[in-house]
Amino acid sequence: EYTESGANHGKKVFKRTKIPTGVEDIPVFMYYWDARDGADFGGWWFGESVGGSQVWSRCDKADALPPTTGWRIPWDGEVQADLVVDRKARAAAAAAQEAKAEKHEEPNDATPGTEAEAAERVQRAEDRVQIVETEAGQALE
């Protein structure tokens, strides 16, 4: 089980909070790394620290939340079908809602609206982001 513990490269970071029976009690993070160090290093990672050198698995997808499939073990090995990240339903719904909101952004008109209209659009966008972040955090607890 993982809970949200910050952000890295524009996406949430998750830390293991429930250690399975018989597994060593070491820190485990699931985090996103963008392609700034090359395509072979971009994607979601399982590692001992965010951006650290001790990593176990990588998925090259850039999804809003950790992908459910496509994980390589070791990080540069073959995709392992038996490693599946099981997202709670609410987190998956939040990611879908976020993607839908991004597709339906209000048009960027050449004619600017009033200052009040602009402030209202910004507030609606901030409200949507807050809802998605809250739901994703609750789902991953």
Image (tube, helix red, strand yellow):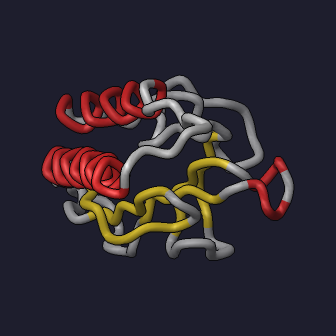
Query: Would you place residue 48 above or below residue 78 in this image?
Result: below
Whether residue 94 is visible: yes
Q: Is residue 136 visible?
A: no
Q: Is residue 118 above or below residue 102?
A: below
Query: Could you tell me residue 16's position as x and y percent?
Result: 31, 63
Q: Position of residue 49 (x, y in %)?
A: 51, 75
Which residue is farthest right?
38
Which of the 4 image quarters holds residue 29?
bottom left
- Residue 123 at what x, y percent from top left? 26, 54
Q: Depth check: 51 or 48 in front? A: 51
Residue nearest the viewer, comparing 26 with 91? 91
Position of 47 with respect to 97 (left or right) is right
Residue drawn at the location 25% of the way across and 28% of the way down: 93
Q: Is residue 82 left or right of residue 6?
A: right
* Residue closer to the observer: 42 or 77: 42
Q: Is residue 122 above or below residue 62?
A: below
Give me the residue at 57% from left, 54% from top.
Answer: 45
Q: Residue at x 82, y 63 (%)?
A: 37
Q: Quadrant of the C terminus?
A: bottom left
Please give the name of the residue rendered at 63% of the width and 43% of the height, measured from the top-left corner: 73
- Total label count? 0
